[in-house]
Amino acid sequence: MKINIRMFCLLLCLSFSACSIEGDKYSADIVITNANIWTGNPDLSWAEAIAIKEDKILAVGSNLEIETQIGTETLVIDAEGKMITPGFIDTHVHFLGGGFNLLSIKLRDAATPEEFINRFVEYTKSVPAGSWIQGGTWDHELWGGTLPERSWIDSVTQDHPVAVSRLDGHMILANSKALELAGISNEVKDIDGGTIVRTAEGEVSGIFKDNAMGLIYSQIPEKTEEEKMVAMKTAMQYMASNGVTTLHDVGNGLWPNLDIYRKMEQDGEMLTRIYK
């Protein structure tokens, strides 16, 4: 029987091509080699390499074992001995509020009243006039325990209402602009479950504790959908940068904003698994 050599070679090439396509179909998108991988699996606590396809782990094992997952399109990363662990789970996160805090003024490490005030001076240069200044998470214990007062910041925040929270979330400092919007004068009475701190002269100092914070918070406009999406993306990027892949949202921001969470999921923008 005569064999058409050209046809035979063509069929052979097509066969190899098909095998290559089929092989890539089942190969990994990413393979990381030369790593110290803690798996959390008592039967294989440590491994050298990992293969990933889309959002699934295909296999972990030795470099030699995982080489079988490498295709022509696989991205191979040499970890150079660095450690890899499963993603961390944070069980107590105020997710949306945390995202807004990441975008807000940074007061957490302000160690003196002068530094505290200067943070406002610098921050007001970067935000439009009339916008609220929130977040902060200040800690007055860093400078000896004296609570800040609105008089500290009034002269540098004349164009902005301010409501910055202490790091525990149980008190805020409001400036005179915020008090004006809330209609609060020195004659205001304390409310149940809250305290309005006063100066030695009996004036409202700007510190509102617990339920009293609502007098100021009630004046802050609702964030726009776009602002919330930016805060969510910022929070997820921060989580990912610290190895957190799953969280339990204990704040009150999830249910009222569920449509935004769903939209981001549908658009493929959710970096974090979020549970309530």
Image (cartoon, rainbow, N blue to C red):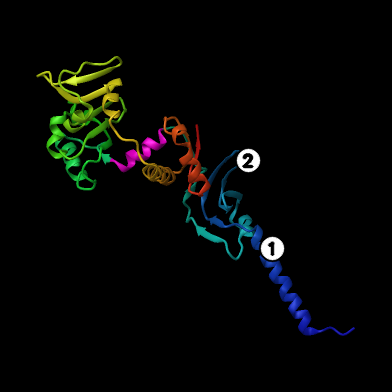
Q: Residue at x 58, y 56 (%)?
A: 63
Circles 2 and 1 in contact, beta carbons < 8 Å: no
Q: Position of residue 247 (x, y in %)?
A: 47, 36
Is 238 placed left or right of 54 in the picture? left
Label 1: element kind: helix
Magenta segment = 94-104
Tag 1 residue: 22
Q: Main secondary structure of the magenta part?
A: helix
Q: Is residue 103 magenta?
A: yes
- Front in this rendered view, residue 124 or 56: 124
Tag 2 residue: 43
Using the numbered discs, state the Cα–Cα distance from disc 2 to disc 1 in whole angstroms.
Answer: 32 Å
- Front in this rendered view, residue 200 or 37: 200
Q: Position of residue 276 (x, y in %)?
A: 50, 31
Q: Quadrant of the N terminus?
A: bottom right
Q: In this picture, is 2 found above or below 26?
A: below
Q: Is residue 274 magenta?
A: no
> The residue under label 1 is which amino acid type?
Glu
Q: Residue at x 78, y 80 (%)?
A: 8
In front of the other: label 2 or label 1?
A: 1
Q: In this picture, is 208 found above or below 249?
A: above
Q: Position of residue 49 (x, y in %)?
A: 56, 53
Is 243 placed left or right of 194 in the picture? right
Residue 142 figure quarter: top left
Residue 153 figure quarter: top left
Q: Residue at x 64, y 59 (%)?
A: 68
Q: In this picture, is 109 found above or below 35?
A: above
The residue carrying pointer 2 sits among few (fewer than 14), some (14 to 19) or many (20 or more) residues within 10 Å by Cα, namely few
The residue carrying pointer 1 sits among few (fewer than 14), some (14 to 19) or many (20 or more) residues within 10 Å by Cα, namely few
Label 2: element kind: loop
